[in-house]
Every structure is written in C-alpha cells, then in structure tokens.
Image (tube, helix red, strand yellow):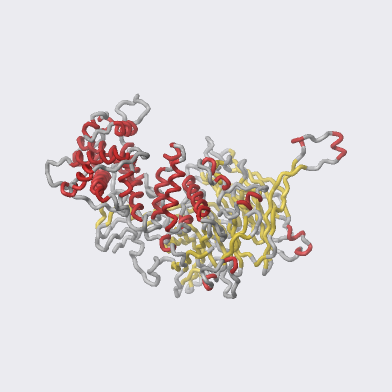
C-alpha cells in the first residue's frame, strides 16, 4: 500500500473544520466519498455538523453542506446506485440527500424520518434484490456469464408486480428498529418496533440481508461480557401501513471472554460488522482495552441436533429428518493487536463460503478478499476476511523511509499518533480512503498483488477481471486506473477488446458504449495513446447521434414488418455499395423520413458535426501513417464508417425537405455537390474495411482524391474534448500529491475563480457546448456543467423547446456520454 494523495482543510482564523466524534464516511459505487466534520466558529463558539461530498477524481472540489442535524452525525450510507445518501444523527433524525439537477457537487435534502431523541447507531438502505457473484477461480473464462453470475436474492420488500420498494432501516440506542418506505408518489411510510420484548441499550449494531428477503440485525451493549444478539426483521405493508415483525436468532459470546487467560483483558466490544450487507451468516467482532484489541470472525452454520439413544430406538432418525439448529462457530481470531481505531470491509461480492478457506488461500493475492484494520499507532493492516491472516501493511510515517524499501519489512517509528478514525474501501478494493484524527482525507492505493511479487501477467489479469466487473455492473472504475502504468495501457485495451468480442451479440450491444468509455479512460494514461482518447469520445458521440436520428424515423403505415425504418436503413446501406448517394436513396421509402420543418432545423448542429467529421476524416486519409493524429482509428473502423454513411443518406433526404438543415461547407466552386463528393469518397474508404477480418489498403486513386479535398472544400477545425483537469494523471509517478480542499493542484495558496474551468482551450478563444455543438463565446454567461471523467462541457439549462432536441438532451440529463457524473462549473471563465 502507498499514499496516492492527501487532502486537508485550509487553516482559517475564525472558523475551522475539526473531526466530528464519531467521525463517519461512506464510499459509493460512483466513486463519490461522503464524510463528516464539525465546523467550529471561534466567535460564536458553536459547532455546525457538516457533510462533505467529493468526487475522487477532483477531491479539492468538495461540496460542503450544513446538514441541519442538531446533534453529531452517527451514520452515512449510500444507496445501491450511488446517487442518494442517508445521514443519521444522535437525536434520531434521518435525512435523505439527492443530487440537485443530477450534479455531483450540488445536493439537497428531500425526505427523511425521525425517532425523536433516540440516537441512531446503525443505518442501511433496504436491499433491492440485485446480487452479482464474482467467481475468482473462473477469471480466465471467456464468457462473462461464468465469471459473474446473478445470485437469486429477494428484495426486502416488493411493490405490485415484484418491483423492489425503496426505503431504509435504522437501529437506535434504546433497542428500537425503524423502517421508512418511499412510495412511488413521494410519501414516506414509517414504522417503529422494539427488537425484543426486553429492551436494552444498544451501543453497536449492524444490518444485513438474507436471500429470502428478511433482514438480520446484530446488536451489542458494548460489553464483551454480554452476548452479541441477533434478530430477524420482516417488513411488510398491510392496509397502506408499514408493519415490522421481529424474531430472536441465536446469539454468541466472544471467544476472548471465555478464554481464562484473556477473560478480563478486553472489556469492551468496539466494532461489530457483518462481512457484507448481503452476507448475514458471517460477522466480524473486535474487542479492545485502552492499548490493545483482538478481532474475531464468526460464522452461522446449520448443525444436526444429536438425539438421545432412547428416542433413537423409539423413532430412528433417517437422512434429512435429523433435526437441525443454527449455531455460531468461530472461524478465526487474531493474536493481541494494537488498539483498532477503524474497520473497512470489502464490497466485492466474491463467493466464499465457510468451507472455502482452501480456495481463499489459493486466491489470497486477489483484491477484495481483504478487510482493512486501522490502528491508533497510525498503521493500517489488510487481513484476509475469513482467516484474518496478514496480507499487507501500511505505516502512516512511511514517507520518512526509502520508497523502494518493502512495506512488510519497515520498522515502526515514533511520532505523533495520527490515525484513521474512519475508513472505507473502494468497490473494487484497490483503494482505501481514510479520514484521520486531524480531519485530513487520505487516499491509499492497495496493490492488486497485496504487496507480494506477482508476474506482470497476473497483475494484468486481476486488473482486467475488475475492469470487466465494472463494465458489467456499471460501477465507476476510477480506483482501477490508480494502478495502470503507461506500459500497461496498450495491453489492457487489447485484452479488454478481445474479451468483449467473445461475448454474444446481445451483450455486446448492451456494453458497446461502456467499453468505448473504458478504453478512452485507459488511453488517457499513456502519452503514446492520448490521441485515441479523442477518437473514442468521437465514437461515443457518433453512436449517440446515430441512435437519436434513427429513432426519429417512423413507419408510414402502422401494419409494417418487424424491422423499424432505422434497421431497414442499416440493411439497405450495407447491401448497396454504390458510391452514388442518390442511387442509394431510391431504394429507401422516403415517406418514412418525413419530419416537421422545425424539427429538422433544430437538428442542424448535430448534422453539421456529422458533415464536418466526415470531411475531416477524408482529408486526413493521406496522413494515415501518423497514429498520433486524432481520427486515425476511424480510417480502419468499418462499423463507424458505415454509420457515417447511413447518416449521410438520411441527411441527404432531409435536405430535400429542408435545405437549411444541411451541413454548411465552404467550397471553391458554386456548382460543387459537396455531399455527393464526400459520400463517394466515404463509400470507397468504407469498402476497404467493411469486413473486419479482411481490411485492404486504400488505393492510390482514393488517396489522390482526398489530397485534392483541401483545394475544393475548407477543412473544418474539429473541437475535440478538452484535456481533463482530474488528479489521475498526476498520480502516474507514484509520488504523494498534497492537496487542499477548495484549491486545485498547483494553485494551493492562491484563489483563482476559474481554476475549475475544464474546457479552456486558450485564453480568449471561444468555448463550445460539446453535446449541443453550440458556440458559447469566449466568456460564457450561461451556467454550465462538466463531466467528472472526460471533461465534456454542456449548458446546465436547455435553450431549446423542440421535442427532438429535448429528446437528445434527455439522454444526458443524468450522465455524460462516457457515463461520468456531471458537476456544476463556476460562471466566471477567463
């Protein structure tokens, strides 16, 4: 493990952020991190309980909000989509936070619930029934269905038709369980029930879910001499009211309390966690004294109940008729450790059962099998989540030691005991975020090899497997990019493409845009592949335009064949290889292409991009030997050239209806039919690479014609996406980057209003809306938003009223072309 970056608060004379007690943080599947601090005002001598949300790619761009909680925040919890956040406090108030206008740096409190005056000690969203299992032992399989399988898992509660009902469950310090359900109409149904008849103090609690749709709650009063209690909670809706039923499950005493040598050594249970939200059969316990801790892993098993011989003779027990009971058994325990300050559990759903310790040892170097323990001396240990064996170590003062010294051999040094008070592992377990006792946020890289020497192929296989997992689930893969070196990029992109091509056609279609976005983010990490980033983003834009324009086509008669007009267009354009655009047109039913005049005119900016890009590609064909030139990969991409060819045909037909919607070219001759010329050259180029396995070189005649294009038409400048201002490119050399909240890298100590302007091409040059293809001017006055991953910029509010354009804009309301989240940008650009 090593530190990637550290982000801290600026010291101010009158108000400062200080760590809250307790301090909590949460990490979403979209790589958003939420954590708490208390804002201390020296003049008024009061505390404001703050919630901070950062995107891991732009940690300095923190969104801080006054939570409105009157007492300290005790819990933070992201939902399964990573777009909503729950916060709960020591006064029983629970708030649900949602993005404002789908912006990652703008949040608002929408709904909530309250158990007045009763501090919340555990909080969780209800399970939605979606569970995917990773099969590490099958990571070399070709089919994604073998590597990642859907596990049969029931939602906590379902609506009519089986749709999972949204809501949350919380446990309070007085032993109450409260459930709030979000109805589709926005109403909140809340019910509260005691966990058992004899209510007792609950100091620690956690929530997990069973495959049958039930909820399991684990509680402890904080004393190691008291049992850890478990309860089954069933939630239902009866007569439009929420109903809660509870049932006591088998309890356990920690092993250290029954060991005569340690009976009174660890008086307090300080941490109680299920190993996973959907793994209610395994629990992690930590007992501590002032200086030391011990950690135990327990598992719930079904065991046969022995039957007395007398009853055996009366009624012999045969086979499955033997009575079974549930019993907690200890899986593993650590020796005496330093005092544990925080625990972070893995989120990867690797399928390991109680008897999988052999498999666990065989795959012990795979990320996701380890959980993190932080200690008061500043160190962090990664231990196996079942055997609790040591896998990797990080020391907080490692910056004082040689970089090349192995972490496992580094001796501890004395120093200030700065330690993590809250930690979270990323969703692939390749990164660890911790907030320390000074309020600083630290991002740690966790090597895929867990500190052990693995060959390059094994490390690449681990990274590839996790990239495939993110591709299938839709989770953000920023934490994987932390470990990709420039020398790996080409290999990873090729391997990823090979694995993608092995999948069936239906799955390829579903993942078609996600893999392009993934390739773009990988190519950004190497100087030799940086030009391909532009190509991948242009391909995403082309796919989106093609889908949108084809969706506008409507069959002339309702009783048409199964194929849509868009499908017939693709089929006819692939069969007819004529270079004359008008001869291709006559094979189409032009009545299916009739649209309103206002609709056609509103699409002109998108149509112009298609025309400009085709001209740019053909003009760059003579320079095809230069792979560093943007657009190079399109010259061998038969599928993309085929899409351009189809769109040229559609645009030609629409131009007959509304000539002003056609792309505008600056030609040297007034009689030049630019569309026909470009279509003819495009078709010839497409014929060279239409078959992926039989690509031929363009002949000299085609190259000569393309050489003449600059003398016939003015070649446009293509507005490529800007270079992103994220942190990932600054972490390539494995050197620690020190950041400050609110100030971009390299600008610490200076306040510059335009530091987050991700799309400045040059001072004074006009900016462009990359999605609407509208020019915004040199100093835009409209509010804009930018993508957290690729830097794509678009206006926050739509200037259009035409339905077709609104349909285009609606595609990007939540996410960018690449799948990244949006963040609001400041108005002042320089």
Q: Nearer the viewer, residue 63 or 342?
A: 342
Q: Is residue 204 above or below residue 710?
A: below
Q: Residue at x 24, y 49 (%)?
A: 622
Q: Is residue 813 visible?
A: yes
Query: Which image quarter is the C terminus in?
Result: bottom left
Is residue 179 among what the camera can see?
A: no
Image position of 463 with respect to 379: above or below: above
In the image, 113: left or right of 702? right
How far from the left and from the top, in percent, is residue 189? Answer: 55, 45
Residue farthest along the top direction in this orientation = 559
* Residue 236 picture location, percent across and down: 60, 41
How many numbered callouts?
0
For the N terminus, the quadrant is bottom right
Image coordinates for residue 480, horizontal then vertical, percent: 48, 55
Q: Residue furthest left?
A: 670
Estimate the x, y position of residue 584 in percent, counting from the top left: 24, 32
Name the one closer to the observer, 302 or 439. Answer: 302
Q: Is residue 228 left or right of 803 when viewed as pictured?
A: right
Q: Quadrant of residue 559?
A: top left
């Amino acid at each position: 493990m090593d530190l990637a970056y550290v982000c801290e608060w600026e010291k101010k004379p009158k108000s400062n952020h200080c760590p809250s007690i307790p301090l909590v943080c949460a990490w979403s599947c979209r790589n958003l991190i939420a954590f708490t601090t208390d804002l201390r005002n020296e003049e008024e001598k009061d505390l404001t309980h703050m919630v901070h949300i950062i995107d891991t790619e732009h940690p300095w761009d923190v969104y801080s909000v006054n939570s409105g909680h009157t007492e300290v925040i005790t819990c933070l919890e992201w939902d399964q989509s990573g777009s909503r956040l729950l916060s709960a406090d020591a006064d029983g108030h629970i708030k649900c936070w949602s993005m404002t206008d789908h912006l990652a740096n703008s949040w608002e409190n929408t709904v909530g619930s309250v158990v007045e005056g009763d501090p919340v000690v555990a909080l969780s969203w209800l399970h939605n029934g979606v569970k995917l299992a990773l099969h590490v032992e099958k990571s070399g399989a070709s089919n994604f269905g073998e590597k990642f399988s859907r596990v049969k898992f029931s939602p906590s509660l379902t609506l009519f038709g089986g749709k999972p009902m949204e809501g949350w469950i919380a446990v309070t310090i007085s032993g109450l369980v409260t459930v709030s359900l979000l109805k589709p109409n926005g109403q909140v149904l809340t019910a509260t029930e005691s966990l058992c008849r004899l209510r007792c103090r609950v100091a620690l609690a956690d929530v997990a879910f069973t495959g049958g749709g039930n909820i399991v709650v684990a509680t402890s009063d904080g004393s190691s001499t008291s049992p850890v209690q478990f309860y089954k909670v069933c939630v239902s809706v009866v007569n439009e009211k929420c109903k809660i039923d509870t049932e006591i499950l088998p309890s356990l005493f920690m092993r250290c309390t029954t060991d005569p040598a340690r009976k009174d050594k660890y008086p307090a249970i300080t941490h109680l966690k299920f190993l996973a939200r959907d793994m209610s059969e395994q629990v992690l316990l930590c007992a501590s004294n002032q200086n030391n801790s011990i950690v135990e892993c327990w598992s719930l098993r079904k065991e046969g109940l022995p039957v007395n011989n007398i009853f055996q003779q009366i009624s012999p027990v045969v086979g499955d008729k033997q009575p079974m009971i549930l019993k907690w058994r200890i899986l593993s325990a650590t020796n005496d450790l330093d005092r544990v300050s925080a625990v972070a559990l893995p989120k990867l759903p690797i399928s390991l059962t109680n008897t999988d310790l052999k498999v666990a040892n065989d795959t012990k170097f795979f990320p996701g099998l380890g959980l993190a323990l932080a200690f008061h001396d500043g160190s962090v240990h990664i231990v196996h989540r079942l055997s609790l064996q040591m896998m990797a170590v990080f020391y907080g003062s490692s910056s004082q030691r040689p970089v090349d010294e192995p972490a496992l051999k580094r001796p501890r040094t004395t120093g200030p005991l700065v330690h993590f008070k809250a930690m979270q592992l990323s969703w692939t377990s390749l990164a660890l975020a911790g907030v320390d006792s000074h309020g600083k946020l630290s991002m740690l890289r966790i090597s895929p090899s867990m500190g052990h020497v693995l060959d390059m192929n094994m490390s690449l296989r681990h990274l590839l497997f996790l990239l495939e997992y993110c591709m299938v689930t839709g989770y953000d893969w920023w934490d994987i990019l932390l470990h990709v070196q420039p020398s790996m990029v080409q290999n990873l992109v090729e391997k990823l493409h090979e694995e993608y091509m092995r999948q069936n056609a239906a799955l390829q279609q579903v993942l078609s845009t996600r893999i392009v976005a993934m390739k773009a983010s990988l190519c950004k990490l190497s100087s030799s592949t940086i030009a391909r980033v532009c190509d991948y983003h242009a391909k995403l834009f082309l796919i989106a335009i093609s889908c949108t324009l084809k969706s506008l086509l409507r069959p002339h008669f309702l009783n048409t064949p199964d194929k849509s007009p868009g499908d017939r267009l693709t089929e006819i354009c692939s069969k007819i290889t004529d270079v004359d655009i008008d001869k291709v047109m006559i094979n189409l039913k032009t009545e299916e292409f009739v649209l309103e005049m206002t609709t056609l005119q509103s699409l002109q900016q998108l149509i112009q991009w298609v025309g400009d890009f085709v001209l740019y590609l053909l003009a760059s064909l003579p320079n095809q030997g230069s792979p560093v030139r943007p657009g190079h990969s399109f010259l061998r991409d038969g599928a993309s050239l085929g899409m351009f060819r189809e769109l040229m045909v559609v645009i030609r037909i629409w131009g007959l209806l509304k000539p002003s919607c056609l792309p505008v070219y600056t030609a040297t001759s007034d009689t030049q039919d630019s569309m026909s010329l470009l279509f003819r050259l495009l078709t010839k180029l497409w014929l060279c690479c239409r078959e992926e396995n039989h690509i031929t070189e363009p002949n000299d005649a085609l190259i000569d014609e393309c050489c003449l294009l600059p003398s016939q038409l003015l070649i446009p400048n293509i507005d490529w996406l800007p270079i992103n201002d994220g942190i990932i490119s600054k972490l390539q050399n494995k050197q620690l980057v020190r950041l400050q909240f609110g100030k971009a890298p390299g600008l610490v100590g200076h306040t510059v209003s335009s530091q987050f302007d991700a799309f400045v091409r040059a001072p004074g040059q006009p900016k462009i809306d990359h999605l609407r293809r509208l020019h915004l001017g040199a100093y835009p006055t409209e509010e804009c938003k930018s993508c957290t991953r690729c830097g794509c910029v678009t206006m926050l509010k739509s200037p259009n009223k035409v339905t077709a354009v609104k349909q285009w804009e609606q595609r990007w309301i939540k996410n960018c072309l690449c799948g990244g989240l949006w963040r609001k940008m400041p108005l002042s650009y320089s």
